[in-house]
Image (cartoon, rainbow, N blue to C red):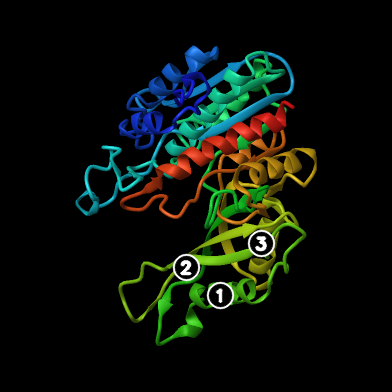
């Protein structure tokens, strides 16, 4: 006679928590109860919970820092419960926040990015704690409601609070959906820097039939852009692809076809590697403008500097965990856009590891339930490698 499995030895299923989180319509900056769902899952596991709000009155962003234990090493999992808008709701197969499972796939806004990942971490961590109730060190979660928005009142502010309250981790893992084709095929060990330049070149307005009496700012700005777009900044570095510079806007606001305008404006977005900083890129732009003797104004907005967590003990431990749990040998990668890892890198080594990101931000965003459960096993193995 076969004995039933001991429930205490069965892996925790991340699906119910993922569904509960998805059913909270937490479009940035709304929380819609998502952090409360997470607190209810963490409190029984012995986590000290710190809920905090940042931002202007009436538009505060809610964040959560939760920690189990007080010793070292301090391992922090970082993520976000906010999601992007649903888009064309009529194009969804069911409600975007119903969290329905159909044919073994969980559908809903945030299923992939990244409520499913948070649920998988909590499930895997729960199994680890159950098997190792007196584990060394401490485990924490930094969960924000501002990653998909301006990223001003979320992770950045929580990290400042953590530093002021002696809660800075030794290691951090961001659970963004980093896998490309199959779970575990990619570890993101860094990100490119991102910045945007808003440039206005001044000229002298005049009649297009008498160009000698005017100074056409369009011609001057076009020459500047030609300089910038035909001379590569670099050919890449050890861990990064080449820096890219893209003109993303050009405008003169001219409704007449016979007027040379007084000003021309453009936007330039640059994704840069570790050979540069936002300051050095800014000087490169200034030099191109000066070379064309332009009278100009330039405003720079920096989303983040480039960073890399170079291979070593921490990255090696994550690779071992992924290989043990999935059989995949993960590729080390630094591609894609920005994430909250750009803030965490100022405090401790940080790597990103999550599920397959093929449907993030799409209509009918989804994650296979089997992948969620496999990801929970990956995260448990990560903790086993970290606290061995």
- Determine the residue positioned at 31% across, 51% down: 364
Q: Position of residue 190 (x, y in %)?
A: 67, 48
Res 63 visible:
yes
Q: Earlier in the sequence, mark 1 or mark 2?
A: 1
The N terminus - image quarter: top left
The C terminus - image quarter: top right
Q: 234 or 45: which is nearer to us?
A: 45
Label 1, label 3: how many angstroms apart (C-alpha)?
14 Å
Q: Earlier in the sequence, mark 3 or mark 2?
A: 2
Q: Earlier in the sequence, mark 1 or mark 3?
A: 1
Res 161 visible:
no
Report the residue marked by disc 2. 264
Q: Position of residue 258 (x, y in %)?
A: 35, 81
Label 1, label 2: how many angstroms apart (C-alpha)?
9 Å
- Determine the residue positioned at 31% across, 52% down: 363
Report the residue marked by disc 1. 220
Q: Which mark is residue 328?
A: none
Q: Position of residue 275 (x, y in %)?
A: 75, 57
- Determine the residue positioned at 48% across, 51% down: 357
Q: Which mark is residue 286?
A: 3
Q: Kindly indicate the quadrant of the structure image that contains residue 315.
A: top right
């Amino acid at each position: 006679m076969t004995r039933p499995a001991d429930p205490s030895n069965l892996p925790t299923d991340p699906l119910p928590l993922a569904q509960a989180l998805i059913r909270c319509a937490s479009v940035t900056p709304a929380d819609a109860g998502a952090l409360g769902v997470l607190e209810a899952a963490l409190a029984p596991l012995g986590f000290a919970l710190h809920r905090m709000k940042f931002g202007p009155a009436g538009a505060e962003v809610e964040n959560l820092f939760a920690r189990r234990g007080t010793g070292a090493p301090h391992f922090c999992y970082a993520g976000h419960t906010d999601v992007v808008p649903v888009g064309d709701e009529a194009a969804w197969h069911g409600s975007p926040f119903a969290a329905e499972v159909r044919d073994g796939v969980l559908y809903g806004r945030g299923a992939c990015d990244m409520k499913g990942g948070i649920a998988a971490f909590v499930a895997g961590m729960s199994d680890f704690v159950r098997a190792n109730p007196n584990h060394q060190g401490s485990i924490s979660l930094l969960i924000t409601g501002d990653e998909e928005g301006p990223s001003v009142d979320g992770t950045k502010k929580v990290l400042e609070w953590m530093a002021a309250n002696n809660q800075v981790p030794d290691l951090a893992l961001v659970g963004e959906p980093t896998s490309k084709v199959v779970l575990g095929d990619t570890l993101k060990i860094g990100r490119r820097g991102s910045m945007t330049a808003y440039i206005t070149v001044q000229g002298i307005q005049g009649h297009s039939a008498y160009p000698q009496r005017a100074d056409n700012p369009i011609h001057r700005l076009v020459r500047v852009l030609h300089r910038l777009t035909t001379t590569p900044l670099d050919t890449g570095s050890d861990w990064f692809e080449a820096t890219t510079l893209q003109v993303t806007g050009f405008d003169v606001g001219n409704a007449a076809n016979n007027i040379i305008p007084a000003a021309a404006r453009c936007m330039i977005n640059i994704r840069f590697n570790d050979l540069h900083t936002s300051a050095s890129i800014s000087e490169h732009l200034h030099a191109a403008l000066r070379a064309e003797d332009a009278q100009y104004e330039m405003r720079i907005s920096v989303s983040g500097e480039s960073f890399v967590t170079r291979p070593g003990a921490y990255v090696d431990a994550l690779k071992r965990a992924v290989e043990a749990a999935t059989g995949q040998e993960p590729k080390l990668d630094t591609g894609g856009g920005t994430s909250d890892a750009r803030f965490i890198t100022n405090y401790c080594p940080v790597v990103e590891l999550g599920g397959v990101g093929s449907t993030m931000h799409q209509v009918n965003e989804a994650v296979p339930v089997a992948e969620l459960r496999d990801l929970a096993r990956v995260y448990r193995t990560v903790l086993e490698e970290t606290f061995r």
